Image (spheres, grey):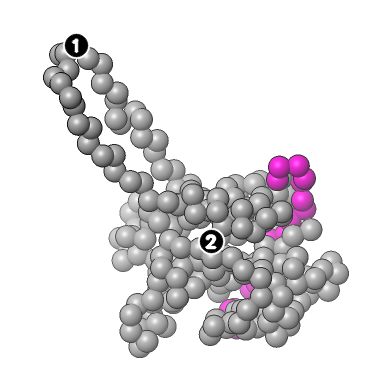
Amino acid sequence: MIVLVGLGNPGEKHARHRHNVGFMAVDAIGDAHGFGPARAKFQAEIREGFLTGDSDRVKALIVKPQTYMNESGLAVRQVADFYKLEPLDFVVFYDELDLASGKLRIKTGGGAAGHNGIRSIDAHLGNGFRRVRIGIDHPGDRSKVTGHVLGNFAKSDQEWLGLMLDAIAGAAPFLTTDDQRFASEVGQRTAPIRPEKPRREASAKPETETRPDKDAASPPGPFSALGKFFGRGDSEH
């Protein structure tokens, strides 16, 4: 069994905050892989489902603590005790100021680096759990950190955020077998599109030459996981 913990603060008021990107990530996974509906248990909102990898179908539990960020470890401890799980069975998704927007890193263990949700889980579970850090960038001034973290994602963030959430959801099954493969898959899916180099033509082409339809060759970016966070009429920045 694998437990996917998303960190954030409960309630509509906080739903679009950068600090809630952990909630967004596990919601994207649950939606993409057909997890069951959310229900209240363990002082958290949980969803049950399966992640299917190359050969195995692994039971998975999504956990979104509802105790506010500073007490996230309470729910995690209850889940660990109920299912008799070890720290390595937990993968925690959360925001990281020291990573650029659109970047992701995964590791096992380490310090809390000032993140209160991680500090709480460390206190209740130990620090041997897996951590998926999702970059939200640093505002550049320490005095602006609180407003940045507890502020909504801007319209200009939609492209990278949608791509990131879709990539996390698509690569999630690799978390059952290979953390680095998961990170590699996310990296490939979120790599920036590089413009094509202009072709040098050695000689004039006949007027009847058939040219490829560039628009038809460029698949649309669905960013499906963003639908619940950004509406068309939302002008928030």
Q: Quadrant of residue 152?
A: bottom left
Please report the residue visible at 32 percent of the width from the left and 60 percent of the height from the top: 156
- 60 vs 217, left or right, is right
Q: Which residue is mark 2?
A: 24
Q: Position of residue 41 (x, y in %)?
A: 74, 68
> Where is residue 168 shown, x and y percent of the image?
55, 54
Q: Judge from the rendering whether residue 66 lies leftward or rightward of residue 192; answer left or right.
A: right
Lateral position of residue 181 relative to residue 103, left or right: right
Quadrant placement of the C terminus: bottom left
Question: What amino acid type is highlighted by mark number 1?
Answer: Thr
- Which of the two discs, 2 and 1, sits closer to the camera? 1
List x then y, in percent, for residue 155: 33, 60
Q: Could you tell me how many numbered marks the image carries? A: 2
User: Counting other residues with Cα less than 10 Å from the Cα at mark 1, is it few (<14), some (14-19), or many (20 or more)?
Assistant: few
Q: CA distance from mark 2 to mark 1?
A: 51 Å
Nearer to us in this view, 146 or 177: 177
Secondary structure, mark 2, is: helix
Q: Which residues are magenta?
A: 53-75
- Image x and y of residue 80, in percent: 79, 72
Viewer-nearest residue: 85 or 73: 85
Q: Residue at x 79, y 58 (%)?
A: 1
Label at residue 208 = 1
Q: Earlier in the sequence, mark 2 or mark 1?
A: 2
Question: Which secondary structure, mark 1?
Answer: loop
Q: Is residue 66 magenta?
A: yes
